[in-house]
Amino acid sequence: MKEINREVKQANELTWHDKHKQAMTVGDRIADSVAHNMGSWKFIIIQSIFVLIWMIFNIIAFINHWDPYPFILLNLIFSTQAAYAAPIIMMAQNRQNQRDRHQAQSDYETNLKAKLEIESLQKEISRMDDDKLEKIIQLITELKNSKN
């Protein structure tokens, strides 16, 4: 019964990942989302299409080039995007490092518990073997005494 209660308690405990997700702030979630989206092929394709359309419209525009070659406004947009993207991505990477540390600590604790349980089982098996050996010796001794 004691072991069943322990297993139920362990099943109800939050994993390191659940605890980490609960501790995340709104800013953390936004930074992770931005980093996830900016690090995708979808983002690269969309941005490439945007750049091509921007350049084509500015090259073929007959009147009112809003950003004539060498596309200074486009460069400014990319510079601004990079200025904000870099720290946001670094925040997401720092959180990933933190998650990795939590996972490593959790793995260590799990391994330590498993080691202690294995040692306990080994001691129990050794005790059972000793008891069996003691009974065998006792039976042999009784058998010898009954023959004499």
Image (tube, rainbow, N blue to C red):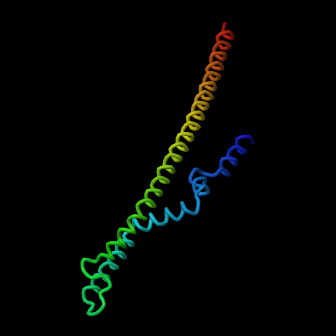
Residue 29 percent coordinates (x, y):
54, 63
Residue shown at the point (37%, 73%) measured from the top left? 77
Q: Nearer the viewer, residue 115 or 92?
A: 92
How many numbered dots are placed on residues in this image? Answer: 0
Residue shown at the point (52%, 65%) measured from the top left? 30
Residue 87 percent coordinates (x, y):
44, 59
Q: State the quadrant of the C terminus.
A: top right
Q: Nearer the viewer, residue 121 or 59?
A: 59
Residue shown at the point (46%, 66%) measured from the top left? 34
Whether 29 is drawn above or below 7: the answer is below
Residue 121 percent coordinates (x, y):
60, 32
For this view, does 61 lie left or right of residue 82?
left
Q: Residue furthest right?
A: 1
For this view, does 49 lie left or right of residue 10?
left
Image quadrant assignment for residue 23: bottom right
For this view, does 132 lie left or right of residue 60?
right
Whether 24 is drawn above or below 123: the answer is below
Whether 70 is drawn above or below 97: the answer is below
Whether 20 is drawn above or below 110: the answer is below
Q: State the quadrant of the N terminus.
A: top right
Image quadrant assignment for residue 65: bottom left
Residue 53 percent coordinates (x, y):
31, 83
Q: Residue furthest top?
A: 148
Q: Nearer the viewer, residue 7 or 62?
A: 62
Residue shown at the point (55%, 34%) measured from the top left? 115
For this view, does 42 lie left or right of residue 68?
right
